Image (spheres, rainbow, N blue to C red):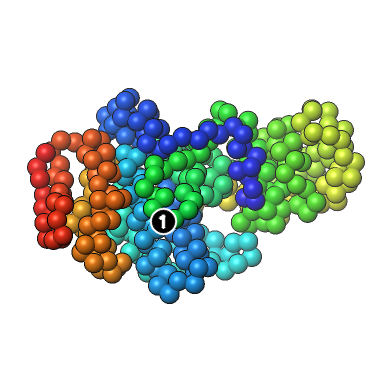
Amino acid sequence: IESIYQLVDDAAFTCKLRDFVLEHGFIKDHYGSRTVVIGIDISSFLDGYHASSRAKGQLHTSNSTLTQFYKMLCSLSKSGAHCIFVYDGDERPSVKRGKQVVMRELDYQKHSRTMIKHFGYYCHTAPGEAEAELVDLYKQGIIDTVLSKDSDVFPLGATSVMKVIVPKGPGNSWRKDLRVRVYRSETMGYSQGGFILIALLLRNDLTSGVNGIGHQTARGLAQSGFGDDLLSAYQLFSEDLQQLSQAFQKLNEDMVYEIEHNKRGKMGSRSPIRAGIFRDSKFPMVADIPALDAFLRPATSSSRGLPLAQSSLRLPTLPDILGITKFCTTYFAWSEKLTLEHLHTYLWSGVVMRMLCSVSDQQIPSVHTTNDISEIHCLQF
């Protein structure tokens, strides 16, 4: 949804992910696992890394994409978080924002699954869009929060969301602790209906929004409770299009009146001009039902009657350093010396954190500070 994070950013706070996991997971011994389980929309990160690599004109964009993802995985390990990465499935929309979506799994996406497994994290494929599946996992109690760049998670019903503050500067900036913005529903001031109303008024993946209506108007209408009115009308009359159309028409009249007179005091100012624009748009209409369905009835494992994600996904496991090492030398074309340097620079502190959050009888690979990559073996703790 276009710039929705701007509407809720004042209610968020910034922290180191490590500190968040320490407070909410390790100290509280959360679920007996001493960590916080984060569900991650992987496409929002991989696609961004891939686009960045192409924009820089790099020849081997797949390798560059995976290198950036490797550093992100190291940062997540350093925080002590346990992660479940969710991939889009076959039922996701084939067209978004008027552009064709690539439905096949690309090479860097396939290799990312291997890397995630080596880091001791889990992969899960949604039947439809990953954001909807993440919200479903959150409601099941499988994950504790959602990490995504995509603000669609708000109208889908997520009430605990994180957004990565991307390190700026040279590549070694990933050596610093990962910082996140944390959004909680109790401080944002919007219901799910409010977020859905904002999504429909502004540009989103499925609709172009209402021309001439901007963030201030969308925020004011949502805070005035019209989003909840929209959901009530939809839920009451979704099986009767004639009654639904009448309810939508009444809702349009009520919102026009509020924009023009600001009786509830949330619009900022009165605006007869915007009221006229809104009246002419005839929003909401029956044509908006597919977008409403996308937020309220998305394709998820629960809605499709598929087996629910296992609660064992919550259990943190240790990284496979030997597997990570072989992956780096194979796909990144790193020399043995460079691979060891990267392990010590980016990975090792994360391994120690994961050891502290894991059960005591697991095996942890150890890397000696030599130039021989064969000096990797397992120690029993």
The residue positioned farthest toward the top in the image shown? 28
User: At label 1, which amino acid type do we have?
Assistant: Gly
Whether residue 188 is visible, yes or no, is: yes
Q: Position of residue 282 (x, y in %)?
A: 81, 50
The residue labelled by disc 1 is: 171
- Placement of 131 over or under 14, stated as above or below: below
**Residue at point 52% right, 49% down?**
149
Residue 254 seen from this side: no
| Residue 336 x/y as whole percent | 20, 64
All told, the count of numbered labels is 1
What percent of the width, then of the height, locates residue 367?
A: 16, 51
Near-viewer residue (306 or 368): 368
Q: Is residue 108 above or below residue 361?
A: below
Q: Nearer the viewer, residue 154 or 45?
A: 45
User: Could you tell whether 345 is left or right of 144 in the image?
Assistant: left
Q: Nearer the viewer, residue 162 or 210?
A: 162
Side (left or right) of 250 relative to 60: right
Residue drawn at x 47%, y 66% as measured from the top left: 53
Q: Secondary structure at mark 1?
A: helix
**In the figure, residue 31 lies in which quadrant?**
top left
